[in-house]
Image: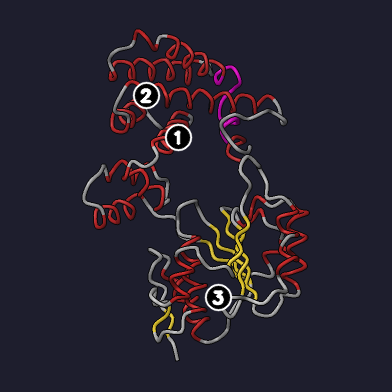
Amino acid sequence: MKKVKIDRLYGNETIKKYIEDRINGGNLFHAVILSGKEGNGKSTLAKQIISAIACRSQIAPCGQCDACKKILNDECVDIHIIKLPEGRSFVPIDSVRAIYDTVAYKPNDLDFKVYLIQKGDKMLPQAQNALLKLLEEPPENVYFFILCEDEKKLLPTIRSRCEVFRLQEFSAEELLKYLQDNYEYGDHKAASSLAQGSLGLAVKMLSGDDPAIKRRQISDRLVELLLDRSVSEFEFIAFQYENIKSLQELFEIYKLLLSALRDILAAKESDSAELLYYENTEKLDDYANRYSSFTLASMCKAMLDVLSNEAVNTRLPLTITGASSKLWDMKFNGEK
């Protein structure tokens, strides 16, 4: 009798133990929702569960048999992945309906078939209702995995027919320890503080694979600091000194910050504002209620002034200090 051991997912010990016990006991779930921040192991856990079910080794998943290798290398023809199409905001209903065209076919590499829906919280209600019919009467030897960042965006009827696992968000201290233990080089502290709980994002930042991600994360954090009344100007400046290393990077981040402030102001003025920085208004509602329209507009004007003098600014510390002083003047004087 094989024994399942989920060992490729960092943290999440309670979830891993529960899944191991379920599979070891032969009490398998036919549909699973894996929810959590981007980069926190949803795809990794899905592959581990699928491999554990398929693997014939005494300790599963072994990672060495043909089934494990095909699953881990994304080469298994019995795993059907439904993706968010490039340039689309939602998973189209046709992508879900297409499952009906293949679900009855016999598997090839494995003894079962898998349908893995990425960005499941991007399914419109019509697409979710199409999936619901399959979940209500699941075909034999077919498993469904729905990966999402927010399971609450799925219909209650979908959630009620699935095992729901919300993966762990890591503290900056936990991320820092992981990075220090596993990666010799890089700015461990900056990556752990900017990743906002995402292990995958922290690793990307540390490796320098995606500077655009790092700039966006710094911009997100600047918005949080700027709009928090308890944060001092010194803290705002210190964060920039620690995480921004060049004038070019600073102005790229300030352009993002300006876009964020414009979105917040637009959301405050209209329920149907066209957003450029944020994907939705969930976070904007909180930000927009903290300050008046006049103050937000004044902050935008301050950022425009800084960016319009980009060519004449030649020293990073002075530019950061000057820009921060302008923003802080608007932050408090605008409310008077």
Quarter of the picture containing the N terminus is bottom left
Report the predominant secondary structure element of the magenta stretch.
helix
Tag 1 near tag 3, CB within 8 Å: no
Q: Which residue is mark 3?
A: 109
Identify the element where label 1 is drawn.
helix
Image location (x, y in percent) of residue 334: 52, 16
In the image, is residue 149 part of the stretch drawn in magenta? no
Separation (CA) of disc 3 from disc 2: 51 Å
Circle on res. 208 = none
Question: Which span is picked out in magenta?
Answer: 286-296
Closer to the N terminus: mark 1 or mark 3? 3
x then y, percent, for residue 211: 38, 36
Which badge, 2 or 1, comes first in the chain's sequence? 1
**Rendered position, 183 above or below 244:** below
15 vs 270: above or below: below
Number of residues whose C-alpha sits closer than 10 Å to that of mark 3, classed few (under 14), some (14–19) or many (20 or more): some
Tag 3: residue type?
Asp
Give the vertical position of 255 relative to 206 (above or below).
above
Which residue is denoted by mark 1 in the rendering?
216
Is disc 3 placed on a helix, strand or loop?
loop
**Residue behind mark 2:** 250
Name the residue located 71 percent from the left edge and 76 percent from the top edge.
139
Q: Residues within 10 Å of mark 2 (few under 14, many from 20)?
A: many
- At horizontal 52% and vertical 72% (from top left) the residue drawn is 50
The mark lying in front, picked from 3 and 2, is 3
